Amino acid sequence: MITTALLGWWGIPSGLFRTPHAIISSLIDNNKREIISDSILTQFVITNIGEIRTNWDKENELVDFIRHNNQTN
């Protein structure tokens, strides 16, 4: 955000209008970030509950599964 505030203005003429918009949008999204993260996590668990329960006591398997999902999505 600091880089945008300092350098975004140089994209004349659109930078003069888009920079404040980008900064304000980012600030608004920061307030919603926790809600969005909770929603994504809940949806992931609901979709993959079988895999999670199967490997509940196998930490390495769960970590590999989550890493694989992060790479494919």
Image (cartoon, rainbow, N blue to C red):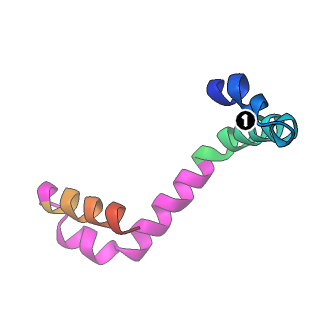
Q: Nearer the viewer, residue 20 or 30?
A: 20
Quadrant assignment for the N terminus: top right
The image quarter in which residue 39 lies = bottom right
Whole-percent x, y for residue 65 in the image:
23, 65
Residue 13 figure quarter: top right
Q: Give the range drawn in magenta.
A: 35-60
Q: List the residue tagged with mark 1.
A: 27
**Which quadrant of the structure image shows residue 51?**
bottom left
Residue at 82% x, 34% y is 20
- Helix, strand or loop for disc 1: helix
Residue 16 shown left or right of residue 59 in the figure:
right
Judge whether 35 appears above or below 51 on screen: above
Q: In x, y percent, where is residue 11?
A: 76, 36
In this view, the residue in front, 3 or 25, is: 3
- On the picture, is 35 further left or further right than 44? right
**Residue 9 on the magenta segment:** no
Classify 3 as above or below 69: above
Residue 47: horizontal and vertical position, in percent? 41, 76
- Left or right of 34 on screen, residue 17: right
Which is the main secondary structure of the residues drawn in magenta? Answer: helix
Residue displayed at 78% across by 29% down: 9
Residue type beneath disc 1: Leu
Whether residue 51 appears in magenta in the rendering, the answer is yes
Pick the residue in front: 44 or 3. 3
